[in-house]
């Protein structure tokens, strides 16, 4: 294996997790991989905790093996906060490094996979390198296309090995919901969007409905001329979701009002929103009640909010320094376009 590498365009980082604790030990490897990548970084986190199988009770427990330890797949809704915090940490670590290096448009993607869910063979397509993490000896069998990529081992922080074995869930919340809905603009798809989409797919059993704001509702946005067309925003969102979980059905619909399909579809059981869009969730609840539609279980993405209390001080400060905003991206594009224009005149 190579011990060093020059600047690369497209990189893959693979690491394993044995708990849902914030993976601070991966911080150095994530930062190094992000610094070495100029266009794309895909981070694949593998763990038995991410298996898609339902947790059974008593003697029917489904166990997955990691090294010498047996780990039970988790209830995806019970560990909602842990998973969104984990995703946020990884995205922020990589995105902050990319932004510090002026690579505002660098594409960072984080995948969560069970050890028995093989990574897609085409994930290696166009990749320049596969990064691994020092001391990570639990990597499961990888597709040949990934195994034959050039490999570099990156340094790790102190790894605390805690095998998570959560107690059987006593929650009244379902482990997965058949049909889940969420919405957003998804312009210049960034880490904040991907966390929202990932968490929606995370708790879905069969179908995820994604409302994508129609072009007509975006006329007052800053730098409107730099907004991606509706078709582009839909395609990028769909491509990301297919990579994150290819087993689900995805319906991407135009949002022309606050409700979208949640305003009329009785076959939706759960809604995923950000903390900032909670008023929209309340409006949807009232509309469904008015139409005698079943109430929705609401799940909130609140870790990425500026005033989040779910991150420790250092992680919260790093989040505040990291700009996960379509407006910021459009402003950056406009500024750089002006600089290039002035340089050519």
Image (cartoon, rainbow, N blue to C red):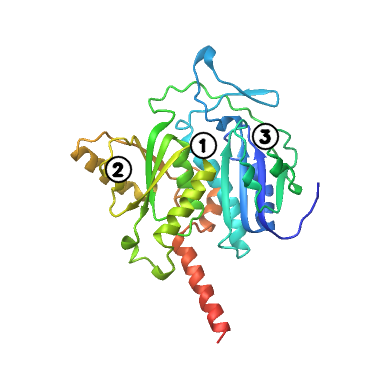
- Of tags 1 and 3, which is closer to the observer? 1
Q: Earlier in the sequence, mark 3 or mark 2?
A: 3
Determine which quarter of the picture holds residue 96. Answer: bottom right
> Which residue is drawn at the image coordinates 56% and 30% (left, top)?
51
Q: Tell me the residue that label 3 is attached to.
A: 160
Residue designated by label 2: 262
**Residue 64 locus on image (x, y percent):** 61, 24
Q: Is residue 335 above or below residue 21?
A: below
Q: Are marks 1 and 2 in contact (CB under 8 Å)?
A: no
> Residue drawn 54% across and 83% down?
342
Task: Give the structural element (helix, strand or loop) at label 3.
Answer: loop
Secondary structure of the residue carrying tag 2 is helix
Between disc 1 and disc 2, whose residue precedes? 1
Of marks 3 and 2, the one in the foreground? 2
**As drawn, which residue projects farthest toward the left?**
290
How far separated are the C-alphas under marks 1 and 2?
27 Å
Q: Nearer the viewer, residue 80 or 196?
A: 196
Q: Which residue is mark 1?
A: 82
Within-10-Å neighbours for mark 1: few <14, some 14–19, many 20+: some
């Amino acid at each position: 294996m190579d011990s060093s590498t020059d600047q690369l365009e497209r990189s893959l980082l693979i690491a394993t997790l044995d708990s849902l604790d914030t993976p601070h030990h991966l911080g150095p490897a994530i930062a190094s991989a992000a610094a070495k990548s100029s266009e794309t970084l895909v981070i694949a986190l593998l763990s038995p905790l991410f298996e898609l199988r339902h947790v059974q009770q008593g003697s029917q427990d489904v166990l997955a093996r990691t090294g010498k330890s047996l780990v039970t797949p988790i209830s995806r809704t019970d560990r909602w906060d842990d998973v969104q915090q984990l995703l946020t940490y990884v995205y922020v670590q990589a995105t902050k490094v990319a932004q510090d290096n002026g690579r505002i448009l660098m594409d960072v993607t984080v995948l969560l996979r069970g050890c028995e869910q093989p990574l897609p063979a085409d994930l290696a397509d166009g990749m320049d390198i596969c990064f691994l993490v020092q001391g990570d000896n639990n990597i499961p069998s990888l597709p040949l296309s990934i195994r034959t990529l050039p490999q570099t081992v990156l340094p790790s922080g102190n790894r605390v090995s805690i095998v998570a074995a959560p107690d059987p869930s006593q929650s009244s919340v379902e482990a997965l919901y058949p049909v889940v809905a969420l919405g957003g603009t998804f312009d210049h798809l960034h880490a904040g969007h991907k966390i929202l989409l990932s968490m929606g797919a995370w708790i879905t059993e069969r179908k995820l409905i994604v409302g994508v704001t129609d072009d007509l509702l975006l006329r007052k946005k800053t730098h409107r001329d730099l907004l991606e067309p509706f078709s582009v925003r839909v395609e990028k969102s769909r491509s990301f979701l297919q990579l994150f979980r290819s087993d689900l059905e995805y319906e991407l619909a135009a949002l022309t009002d606050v409700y979208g399909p949640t305003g009329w579809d009785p076959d939706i059981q759960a809604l995923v929103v950000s903390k900032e869009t909670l008023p929209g969730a309340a409006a949807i609840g009232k509309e469904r009640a008015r139409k005698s539609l079943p109430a929705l279980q609401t799940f909130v993405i609140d870790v990425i909010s500026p005033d989040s209390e779910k991150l420790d001080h250092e992680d919260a400060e790093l989040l505040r320094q990291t700009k996960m905003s379509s407006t910021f991206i459009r402003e950056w594009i406009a500024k750089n376009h002006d600089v290039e224009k002035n340089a050519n005149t």
